[in-house]
Amino acid sequence: MSITNLLNNWSFYRNKRPYRGQYDLNKEYSEYKWAMALDLDICTGCNACTTACYAENNLPVVGKKRFHHGQVMHWIRIERYWDEKMVDFPEQGASFLPMMCQQCEAAPCETVCPVGATSHTNDGLNSQNYHRCIGSRYCSANCPYKVRYFNFWNYPSTAWPAPLPDQLNPDVTVRTKGIMEKCTFCVQRLNEAKSRARTEYRLVRDGEVVPACVQACPTSAITFGNIVDPNSKVAKMWKNQQVDLYKDLQEKDNTVRGYRILEDLRPFPSVMYMERIRDTEA
Amino acid sequence: MIHRLLAVLSFVFLCVGTASAEPLKWGGPIGSQTSDGYNALGPVVKQPIEFPHYRHARDMGISCLYCHTGARRGYVSVIPRIDKCIGCHQNIESVRNKPRIKKLFEYWEKKEPIPWKKVNDLPDYVRFNHERHVQRFYFRQNRPIREVCGYCHGDVANMTVDRRVKSLSMGWCISCHQKDHRENDVSMKTSHGPYECWQCHK
């Protein structure tokens, strides 16, 4: 993008995301907006999603020591919370919250990247280009969810000894030292499904493509789909839970459980969580 | 200072190296890219069998998609398996004693795949989708297949062994994706190819 281009089309580049009509079935190149709905009441915290993500996206296992240094590379992590009221620790049990990149519409990470390695795609994903990244780690510092992971070590040479490179996914780059990475909503699967659909003159059907975490979830706590399509399961869930992609803090009925994390920071995330309800009185 | 010296020296060696290679008929030096991205001639790749593309595609008029079957339905265009060659050639007695065909049947009788070498090789972090290009330009717009493939592969139908003739660099891809193309022959509506990072980079 040249300076002339930037100045001439200032209003185009200076737009505010998200705006209504950004994703529209009739408009070209934006007939997809990938979104998730995650039911915390169903999630058992089994970590299958994390394991599936490690397998799908060539994530290195860093070991205990580096884990304690905070250098772990799980794109989706299960956060544990011990704050359920009324009962004390042993009986209490944890409540779980799988946390992955929220693919924010107004992503805080995108604005701070000095080299433009992270940007927004037309289908509403927050893309990370590994080959442009210089490892400044600004994006990670600015991410309110802390879901960006930095390669502190040269994992390609250490994490997969001799026969293990054979199990790496060829559709995903093996990242090297000094670059940032994050959940992609399994963009390699999405691209393939979109291409297949386009060949057949149609849109991607609901449930045709899911990321690895959704596929692996044994309790189907995660729903994934195209929120532009009003008939998709995820769009219906968002609507039923009165969560609107284009709004930040929303007034809701008491009966719904849906919310997006840190909505008040206005990043407009694409992942809706459904609150966990426990009958602690019984 | 030492870096600059090294850079100058390596540049000199590169120039000498390319000059002593086989004479360049057309295009710039190997691996180079002009401002419009065209005319970047790739290295000569020595294949196990000197496959005559001109015989098949030009003289016989066989469609590229007949052998490169993956191009219309997948990311990679596919170099055909040996049984594809044999399927035709066991019935073509007239060329059965030609040296290349003999070599082909040697591989066939040894039950070995032919170790073809890659000519149009993209970096591992790039995925190029043949299907999208062939579907759009060949199946929807009915352009001739040799033209459609030729956008990236050049005039393979006049080559013996394939050789890369376009630079296949990112700037070269983008130079086409940024242009407005008419969507079909009927409407005047134009669109351009996608150029988000994640379309090609993985």
Image (cartoon, coloured by chain):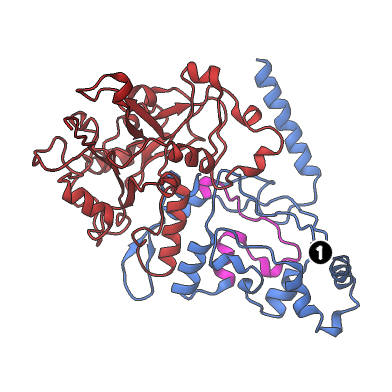
Q: Quadrant of the C terminus of chain A?
A: top left
Per the image, is B157 magenta? yes
Please say whether residue B136 is visible from this viewpoint: yes
Q: Quadrant of residue A105?
A: top left
What span is colored magenta in the figure? B146-172
Please say whether residue B35 is visible from this viewpoint: no
Where residue A134 appears, x then y in whole percent? 49, 26
Label the blue chain with its letter. B
Q: Amino acid at mark 1?
A: Glu
Residue reaching furthest front? A282
Q: Quadrant of the N terminus of chain A?
A: top left
Q: Residues within 10 Å of mark 1 (few under 14, many from 20)?
A: some
Name the residue beneath numbered marker 1: B50
- How many marks on residues? 1
Q: Quadrant of residue B81?
A: bottom right
Where residue A29 appears, x then y in whole percent? 33, 56
Where residue A101 appears, x then y in whole percent? 36, 35
- Location of residue B99 with respect to A224 vertically, above or below: below
For the point 90% across and 71% down, which residue is it?
B99
Label the red chain with its letter. A
